[in-house]
Image: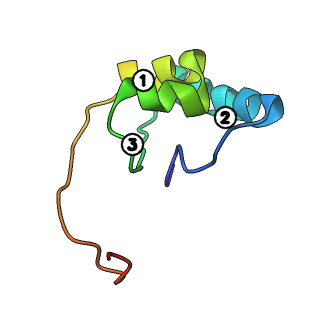
């Protein structure tokens, strides 16, 4: 799930589909790896909604990588 909260806002359809996929994978005990630039739950909830973030946040171990941008996009 690359850049899970990269959109400004999910549509109801996007949110429903994403929730369905994640629920399926969690219920089937499948591994999930989420990446993104947002590291706090409140900011994720603003973009993805509390229900979807609950599924992601409560079933995840957060690992924060601190590094410079390798794509040369930093100021």
Res 42 label: 1
Specify the label residue 71 is tagged with: none
Q: Which mark is residue 18?
A: 2
Labelled pair 1, 3 in contact (Cβ < 8 Å):
no
Q: Earlier in the sequence, mark 2 or mark 3?
A: 2
In this picture, is 36 found above or below 11? below
Where is residue 13? Give x, y as percent: 82, 32
Name the residue at 26% across, 32% down: 61
Q: In this orientation, does residue 59 appear?
A: no
Identify the coloring: rainbow
> Residue at the bottom extreme?
72
Helix, strand or loop at label 3? It is: loop
For the point 44% across and 31% down, the residue is 43
Q: Nearer the viewer, mark 2 or mark 1?
A: 1
Q: Badges 2 and 3: C-beta atoms under 8 Å apart? A: no
Q: Earlier in the sequence, mark 2 or mark 1?
A: 2
Mark 1 residue element: helix
Q: Position of residue 35 (x, y in %)?
A: 40, 50
The disc label shown at residue 38, or none: 3
Q: CA distance from mark 2 to mark 1?
A: 19 Å
Task: Indicate whether 1 appears above or below 57.
Answer: below
Q: CA distance from mark 2 to mark 3?
A: 18 Å
């Amino acid at each position: 799930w690359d850049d899970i909260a990269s959109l400004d806002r999910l549509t109801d359809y996007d949110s429903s589909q994403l929730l369905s996929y994640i629920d399926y994978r969690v219920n089937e005990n499948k591994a999930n790896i989420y990446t993104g630039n947002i590291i706090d739950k409140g900011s994720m909830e603003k973009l993805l909604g509390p229900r979807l973030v609950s599924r992601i946040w409560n079933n995840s171990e957060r690992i924060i990588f601190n590094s410079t941008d390798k794509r040369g996009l930093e100021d």
